[in-house]
Image (cartoon, helix red, strand yellow):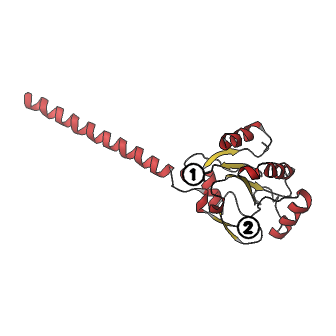
């Protein structure tokens, strides 16, 4: 009887140790897959003129990344974004614009024409980049990072429409995704910026 009881205890102990080990390895795996170790500084993008721009050149700045489209109903945000950029650029904030044609063909222009459109109509001076894809099978690696928690370690934030904004802290990590219709003048957006500037 004692031997049988002892055998049951040993079996229960082995099962408990095994379950605990499996639990720990699962937790470690989930942490490992959630945090890629990447920041936006790991990406090099082409500017609107086709020149390579390592995003690491913006180290130490608060970065606002926005996907744009010249034929979108939200295009008036260009003026607000430019005004925001002029107000905050000397405080260490930069805006990076990425034209994309992912929504109803609302960015049909070439890079050269996009540059002309932004300059002529909205006086854009913040850095604009070459047209990319921000969703789908051909999504640019930068946007794959921005929109997937498994890549950025913070949020899943698929692009819903043109003018979705990502706020990046001074260490190059994603802090927030701001919906397309929420402008840079909105309290939700500005609170994130002010918090990072403290």
Residue sticking out furthest to the front = 90
To which residue does mark 2 refer? 47
**Rendered location of residue 98, percent (x, y):** 74, 59
Rendered residue at 76%/46% (across/down): 180
Q: Quadrant of residue 14?
A: top left
Rendered residue at 55%/53% (across/down): 151
Q: Is residue 97 positioned above or below 6 on the image?
A: below
Q: Is residue 18 left or right of residue 25?
A: left
**Rendered location of residue 174, percent (x, y):** 62, 49
Residue sticking out furthest to the right = 121
Q: Is residue 69 visible?
A: yes
| Front-most of residues 40 and 125 | 125
**Rendered location of residue 181, percent (x, y):** 79, 43
Count of numbered circles in the view:
2
To which residue does mark 1 refer? 152
Rendered residue at 27%/36% (across/down): 16
**Rendered location of residue 21, percent (x, y):** 31, 43
| Front-most of residues 141 and 39 | 39
Q: Quadrant of residue 124?
A: bottom right
Q: Is residue 184 positioned above or below 118 on the image?
A: above
Q: Quadrant of the C terminus?
A: top right
Question: Tags 1 and 2 in contact by the CB under 8 Å rule?
Answer: no
Q: Quadrant of residue 12?
A: top left
Going from N to C along the chain, the mark reached first, 1 or 2, is: 2
Of the two numbered discs 1 and 2 in the rendering, the one whose residue sits closer to the viewer:
2
Q: Is residue 17 left or right of residue 151?
A: left
Element under label 1? helix
């Amino acid at each position: 009887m004692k031997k049988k009881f002892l055998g049951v205890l040993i079996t229960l102990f082995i099962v408990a140790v095994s379950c605990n080990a499996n639990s720990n390895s699962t937790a470690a795996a989930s942490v490992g897959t959630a945090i890629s170790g990447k920041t936006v500084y790991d990406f090099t993008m082409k500017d609107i003129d086709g020149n390579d721009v390592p995003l690491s050149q913006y180290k130490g700045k608060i970065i606002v990344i926005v996907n744009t489209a010249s034929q979108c109903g939200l295009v008036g945000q260009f003026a607000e974004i430019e005004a925001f950029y002029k107000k905050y650029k000397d405080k260490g904030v930069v805006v990076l614009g990425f034209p994309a044609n992912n929504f109803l063909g609302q960015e049909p222009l070439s890079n050269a024409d996009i540059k002309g459109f932004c300059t002529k109509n909205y006086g854009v001076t913040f850095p604009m980049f070459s047209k990319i894809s921000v969703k789908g099978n051909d999504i640019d690696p930068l946007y794959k990072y921005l929109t997937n928690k498994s890549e950025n370690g913070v949020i899943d934030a698929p692009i819903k429409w043109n003018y979705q904004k990502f706020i990046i802290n001074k260490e190059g990590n994603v802090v927030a995704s701001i919906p397309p219709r929420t402008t840079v003048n909105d309290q939700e957006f500005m609170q994130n910026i002010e918090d990072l500037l403290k």
